[in-house]
Amino acid sequence: MKRILVMGLPNAGKTTLAQHILEHLQNERKTVMWLNADDVRKQFNDWDFSYEGRIRQSLRMRDLADSYDVDYVICDFVAPLVEMRNNFKADWTVWVDTIDKGRFEDTNKIFVAPEQYDFRITEQKAEKWGEFIAAHILDNRKRPVFDWQKETVQMLGRWQPWHEGHRKLFERALAKTGQVVIQIRDCQGWNGSNPFASNQVKNFIKRDLDPLYQGQYEIQLVPNIVNITYGRDVGYKIEQESFDDATHAISATKIRKEMGMG
């Protein structure tokens, strides 16, 4: 039996996504049990959302999952605490990251974004991602792990903000070696512009790339590099990529103005 955790803030779309994953797995003749956290709390008449109550709920979800003799058990619950996820010990973790805040302020305050997960979903398109996730689970395809010894493409920029043109450049870079390091110049406020802090830029990039490219890129913060100098026979190439006119026309400056950030 494999445990699938679908986690995220309330109203992020966990239950809808879990249902689609369930349907796709069942269509492949797999036996699947689905546990919803609210249904479980109702069954045990336990509506304690203190720290102790949340820990108890995570252990209960784990015990219930282990009680079923099936191929997969899908559990959708918020799991806002790292301890809760550690207790559940999921074989697959799906982070539904489609909203910034849920409807319960106490949960918003304690929610810790996961650092380890297999899928991060940033758009509410449950049918699309349900099929995608189920296919990976059926093939036992875990996300790739970045290999620091492997040939890698470097992308250096301000990314103020990261946009569709940058995404296309990333995909072109990824096709060369299979992994990319994206370097963020630490330049907030430089030249009277560049309004975004490096952590904001990092979040923009991860939100865009994580659903499909987790493990195939790393992000590094670097100084405000304005010149790159190299000698001969350095063992790497510096290349300029060409795109169609529409892509070249994408302007971070224009996007900032539309955001009211100049």
Image (cartoon, rainbow, N blue to C red):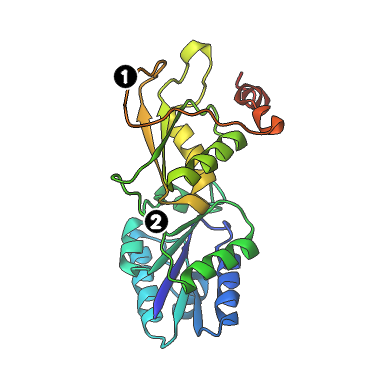
Q: Which residue is mark 2?
A: 144
Please identify the quadrant where the C terminus is shown: top right
**What separation in Å lies between label 2 and label 1 (alpha carbons)?**
34 Å
Depicted 49 relative to depicted 173: above or below: below
**Where on the picture, by quarter, is residue 256?**
top right
For the question of whether residue 75 can be seen, the reply is no
Q: Which residue is mark 1?
A: 231
Residue type, label 1: Gly
Residue 171's x, y, as percent? 53, 43
The residue most toward the front is 233
Residue type, label 2: Pro
In terms of depth relative to the viewer, which is nearer, 101 or 51?
A: 101
Secondary structure at numbered mark 1: loop
Tell me the crowding category of disc 1: few under 14, some 14 to 19, or many 20 or more residues within 10 angstroms, Cα based: few
For the point 38% across and 69% down, the residue is: 91
The residue most toward the right is 246
Q: How many marks overall?
A: 2
Depicted 50 relative to depicted 244: above or below: below
For the point 54% across and 41% down, the residue is: 172
| Mark 2 vs 1, N-terminal side | 2
Depth check, mark 2 against mark 1: the one in front is 1
For the question of whether residue 242 can be seen, the reply is yes
Secondary structure at numbered mark 2: loop
In terms of depth relative to the viewer, which is nearer, 121 or 232?
A: 232
As drawn, is 185 to the left or to the right of 168?
Answer: left
Please identify the quadrant where the N terminus is shown: bottom left
